[in-house]
Image: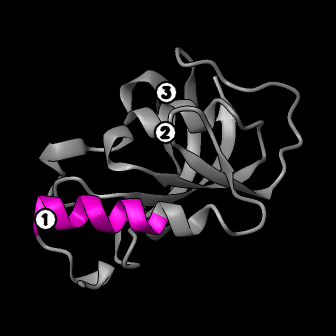
Amino acid sequence: MFSMANATTPEENKAAGIAFLADNTKKANIVTTASGLQYEVLTPGTGTKSPSATDNVTVHYKGTTISGEEFDSSYSRGEPATFPLNGVIPGWTEGVQLMKEGAKYRFYIPSELAYGERGAGRTIGPNSTLIFDVELIKIQ
């Protein structure tokens, strides 16, 4: 048996992600969508509408691996990010559409809704499941 924190091959990453998400479903307040995206509402939004996939959104976020290693954070940069919602990984596109302005959610994104077999950069290996805390600031 291997530790999720020590998964190094694409196969190990995939297995670690599947095990992590299976355990995660047992926790209170975790919702799983038909695609396999998991999320929990940390703060409900105060806005009246949710974005569509074609909207631009302004968000604050932090992304980590399932082992807890942070790979990106708008909080660390000191300014939120703005981008078209359909220009990001599928897990984000799906998840942020569930939010209203002012909401903060935590997304647990299976590899196939993240960067898949290719991974991204040095920190996100192939077939990695990712965790994002996302705060929806504004819909444009």
Mark 2 or 1 closer to N-term? 2
Q: Position of residue 53 (x, y in %)?
A: 54, 19
Q: How many marks?
A: 3
Residue at (28%, 58%) from the top-left corner? 128
- Seen from the viewer's position, the closer of residues 52 and 9 is 9
Q: Residue 92 shows which numbered tag?
A: 2
Q: CA distance from mark 3 to mark 2?
A: 8 Å
Q: Compared to 82, does 128 lie above or below?
A: below
Q: Is residue 13 magenta?
A: yes
Q: Are marks 3 and 2 in contact (CB under 8 Å)?
A: yes
Q: Position of residue 114 (x, y in %)?
A: 34, 44
> Which callout, 3 or 2, points to the residue nearer the camera?
2
- Seen from the viewer's position, the closer of residues 62 and 28 is 28
Q: CA distance from mark 1 to mark 3?
A: 24 Å
Q: Residue 71 shows which numbered tag?
A: none
Q: Are marks 2 and 1 in contact (CB under 8 Å)?
A: no
Q: Residue 85 shows which numbered tag?
A: 3
Where disc 3 sits, the SS reads helix
**Which residue corresponds to mark 1?**
122
Instruction: Decide if residue 86 is on the left or right side of residue 69.
Output: right
Residue at (29%, 85%) from the top-left corner? 3
Q: Position of residue 12 (x, y in %)?
A: 19, 67
**Quadrant containing the C terminus in the rendered view:** top right
Mark 3 or 2 closer to N-term? 3
Q: Is residue 73 magenta?
A: no
Mark 1 or 3 closer to N-term? 3
Q: Position of residue 125 (x, y in %)?
A: 17, 61
The part of the image, by quadrant, that contains residue 27 is bottom right
